[in-house]
Amino acid sequence: MLYSRRSILFLAMTVISGIFSVNAASSAEPTPVKFDSYNGYFVSNQFEPDAKESFVVCVNQQAFDKCFGVAFVMGDKSHRLPKDVFEAQQVIGAIKRGTSIWDYTVKKVAESNDEIEVHYSAKEMKQPSATFSSPLIVSIPKKQYKTISFVENGKVIKVMKP
């Protein structure tokens, strides 16, 4: 059976096109994920008290309460979790402990292939006269993710399998 150059070229282009589309599907661009960040919480002194850093995924209020408590101060205008947050959201957190206070700013949260990346900046403010536990608390849609990666100041510092 003889094939023309045109049909061979068409077949080759079809095969090459298929290969590129499979590669493109497997390395999908991350999709932005709706998130919210919260403050006005302290870290429970019962939750991993000797760890320099902790990372947590809370899918219900009971799990959250084991890690965090509400810090009330006069004139408080903290952004706290809504009452029904765990109906559609889960809460992830990063905690740093030591002689510094940490200020966090979430830059973006993105998902690719059921994997979440939380990108944030962390600024250290040394306070050598006391010890602190500084939490980053973020809510994301409730879903079973393969991994949750914490990307601090452009560097992956923790990958969790929830």
Image: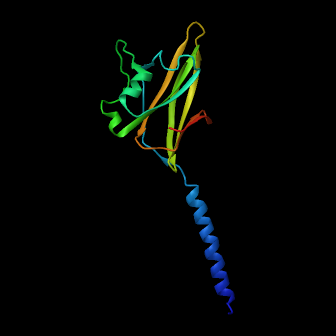
| Residue in view at x 40 percent, y 41 percent | 142
| Residue in view at x 50 percent, y 46 percent | 111
Q: In the figure, 111 relative to 158: above or below?
A: below
Q: In the figure, 6 relative to 41: above or below?
A: below
| Left or right: residue 83 compared with residue 56 | left
Comparing 107 with 66, the one in front is 66
Residue 122 in which image quadrant: top right
Comparing 49 with 76, the one in front is 49
Q: Residue furthest bottom?
A: 1
| Left or right: residue 53 compared with residue 56 | right
Q: In the figure, 121 relative to 8: above or below?
A: above
Image coordinates for residue 28, horizontal then vertical, percent: 55, 55
| Left or right: residue 10 compared with residue 42 | right
Quadrant location, the N terminus: bottom right
Residue 26 in which image quadrant: bottom right
Colouring mode (rainbow / by chain / secondary structure / one colour) = rainbow
| Residue in view at x 38 percent, y 22 percent | 78
Image coordinates for residue 160, horizontal then vertical, percent: 55, 36
Image coordinates for residue 54, horizontal then vertical, percent: 54, 25
Q: How many marks?
A: 0
Q: Residue furthest top?
A: 129
| Residue in view at x 35 percent, y 35 percent | 86
Image coordinates for residue 4, horizontal then vertical, percent: 67, 90
Q: In the figure, 36 relative to 27: above or below?
A: above
